[in-house]
């Protein structure tokens, strides 16, 4: 049996002793080669979950095994084969795009660094501003550079926080195509947090609906649509976020 | 593994060196304060040793003047080594905080010790770039050659740099704990230690109750050693040994504080928003 990209068991985080957990009892297994989504409103626990999956945050209970490595004891072995992108974490803004990619190529031990950078510059159409400081780029350009950085080491597991935020519809669509192609070609697993329901419907084979730190529902976009009797995932999201009864139960 | 570590440390160095390659104001900033300190203290020393032109006798004379000049200028130069090594380390870390890049660094395979090693190497390079010109100026303007102390000066430098790194590591831990709010410590903490480090005067000058405090500071032993070399022409191995032992203790305590705060930051979830 193939090692799953992520094995998450009883993952719980309580920031303050005695307070309500930000995430409680999260359990799921993300297989290789699939794209899954974490959906939920603000404060649902998406960011906390992603931070724990990356080893940035120590869980209060439970465990994460990424690519066969326990993140509590062996996280660096996993991190070398993972990557992450978020529009909320910047790259050094005085370094050019190429220099930023070079830094991360070295950090991730990428072989044939210059060739990989050239590939990413071509793939993400960064050539026009590859020698411009990252701080001078538009929000959309920064998002593309962040995605290029996230693919620098050809990660087997990619965690993305709102991967198409700040992108115009055309560029957003292009990025989604790139992610689909990457997953298919590399057999990688992708876990993304997104508020773009169209994106989730297009990219994801499974959705974990979070509310108040718990998975309140899960399934493929098609299964959730059928279950809630809705035409699009946004309505399902609103049903769950607002605590509305499921169509099937109504 | 060793090769990978070296490459990750190089990644950090490349990130910082690139900034200096492109920005001459940054390079100038490295040299500015050490050179300015040397100029000011050089003239003070010159006045004490040789008096003002056409304005009476010097305050000191002969051998005493030469020794006083050496003690003051040596003190300035060697203290700059401590100061610049501490600031070079802490400010390189702050660069990551300011650019909100820590999140990316800490989800990469970069180990905490590799981060510390990268910052230490950058600190060494920044110190050489900052203090080197001041040393040259001391020789050109005032005829003071720090290397005249002998090869032991390398040990002085090493002991002082190690103390600077230990203090910087503790400051970095406080930045991890309190965020950019602790930034002021990166600039000012060494100035608070200076009065007790016996830079320009022997530990014996301090009040009795303060002397144990001074003797717990590695730099105090280095400066006692420097004065022994300048005044008595001997190497005070006992002071050097104390400096090395105390450096080890300071480094161990600082490393423990850093690792504890790094873990605490991972428990609190502070690594993602430490720049805020």
Image (cartoon, coloured by chain):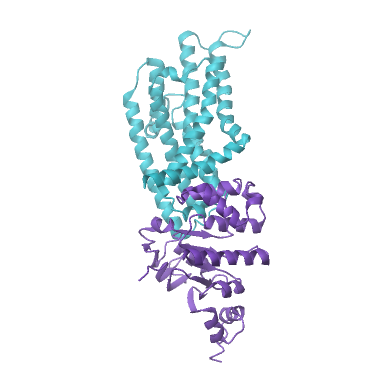
Q: Residue at x 51, y 79 (%)?
A: A220
Q: Which of the image's four quarters has the C terminus of chain B?
A: bottom right
The image shows residue B214, relative to residue A39, as above or below, that is above
Q: In the image, A201: left or right of A73?
A: right
Q: In the image, A24: left or right of B238?
A: right
Q: Nearer the viewer, residue A178 or B231?
A: A178
Q: Nearer the viewer, residue B75 or B25?
A: B25
Query: For residue B208, which quarter of the picture?
Result: top left
Count numbered badges in the picture: 0
Is any part of residue B12 visible from this angle?
A: yes
Query: For residue A226, which quarter of the picture?
Result: bottom right
The image shows residue A224, relative to residue A74, as above or below, that is below
The image shows residue B129, relative to residue B108, as above or below, that is above
Counting from the top left corner in percent of width and height, residue B179 is at: 52, 51
Counting from the top left corner in percent of width and height, residue B210 is at: 40, 33
Q: Nearer the viewer, residue A22 or A217?
A: A217
Counting from the top left corner in percent of width and height, residue B36 is at: 59, 26
Q: In the image, B159: left or right of B136?
A: left
Counting from the top left corner in percent of width and height, residue B106 is at: 47, 54
Chain A on-screen colour? purple
Q: Nearer the viewer, residue A80 or B263?
A: A80
Is any part of residue B180 visible from this angle?
A: no
Chain depicted in cyan: B
Q: Residue at x 35, y 35 (%)?
A: B246
């Amino acid at each position: 049996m193939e090692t799953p990209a992520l094995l998450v068991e009883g993952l719980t985080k309580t920031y303050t002793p005695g307070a309500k957990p930000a995430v409680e009892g999260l359990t799921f297994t993300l297989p290789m080669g699939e794209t899954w989504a974490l959906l939920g409103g603000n404060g649902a626990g998406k960011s906390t979950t992603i931070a724990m999956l990356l080893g940035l945050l120590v869980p209060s209970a439970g465990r994460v095994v990424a690519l066969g490595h326990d993140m509590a004891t062996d996280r660096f072995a996993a991190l070398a084969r993972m990557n992450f992108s978020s529009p909320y974490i910047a790259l050094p803004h005085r370094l050019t795009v190429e220099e930023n990619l070079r830094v991360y190529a070295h950090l991730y031990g990428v072989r044939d660094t210059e060739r990989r950078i050239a590939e990413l510059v071509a793939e993400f159409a960064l050539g026009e501003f590859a020698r411009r400081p990252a701080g001078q780029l538009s929000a959309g350009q920064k998002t593309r550079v962040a995605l290029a950085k996230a693919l620098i080491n050809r990660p087997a597991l990619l965690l993305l926080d709102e991967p198409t935020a700040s992108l115009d519809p055309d560029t957003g669509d292009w990025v989604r195509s790139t992610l689909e192609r990457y997953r298919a070609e590399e057999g990688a697993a992708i876990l993304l947090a997104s508020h773009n329901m169209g994106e989730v419907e297009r990219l994801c084979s499974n959705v974990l609906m979070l509310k108040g730190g718990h998975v309140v529902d899960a399934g493929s976009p098609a299964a959730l649509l059928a279950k809630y009797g809705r035409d699009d995932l946004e309505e399902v999201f609103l049903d769950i976020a607002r605590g509305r009864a499921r169509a099937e139960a109504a | 593994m060793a090769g990978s570590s070296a490459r990750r440390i190089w990644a950090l160095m490349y990130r910082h060196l690139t900034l200096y390659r492109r920005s001459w104001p940054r390079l100038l900033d490295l040299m500015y304060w050490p050179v300015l300190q040397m100029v000011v203290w050089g003239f003070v020393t010159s006045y004490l040793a040789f008096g003002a032109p056409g304005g009476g006798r010097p305050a000191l004379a002969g051998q005493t003047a030469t020794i006083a000049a050496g003690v003051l200028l040596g003190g300035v130069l060697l203290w700059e080594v401590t100061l610049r090594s501490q600031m070079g380390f802490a400010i390189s870390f702050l660069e990551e905080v300011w650019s909100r890049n820590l999140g990316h660094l800490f989800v990469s395979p970069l180990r905490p010790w590799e981060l510390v090693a990268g910052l230490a190497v950058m600190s060494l390079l920044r110190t050489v770039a900052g203090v080197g010109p001041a040393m040259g100026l001391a020789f050109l303007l005032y005829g003071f050659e720090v290397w005249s102390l002998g090869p032991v000066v390398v040990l002085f430098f090493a002991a002082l740099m190690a103390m600077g790194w230990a203090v910087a590591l503790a400051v970095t831990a406080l930045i991890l704990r309190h965020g950019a709010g602790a930034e002021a410590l990166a600039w000012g903490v060494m100035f608070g230690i200076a009065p007790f480090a016996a830079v320009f005067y022997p530990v014996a000058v301090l009040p009795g109750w303060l002397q144990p405090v001074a003797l717990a500071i590695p730099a105090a032993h280095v400066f006692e050693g420097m004065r022994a070399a300048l005044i008595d022409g001997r190497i005070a191995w006992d002071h050097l040994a104390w400096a090395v032992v105390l450096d080890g203790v300071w480094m161990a305590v600082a490393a423990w504080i850093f690792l504890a705060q790094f873990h605490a930051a991972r428990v609190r979830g502070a690594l993602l928003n430490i720049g805020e």
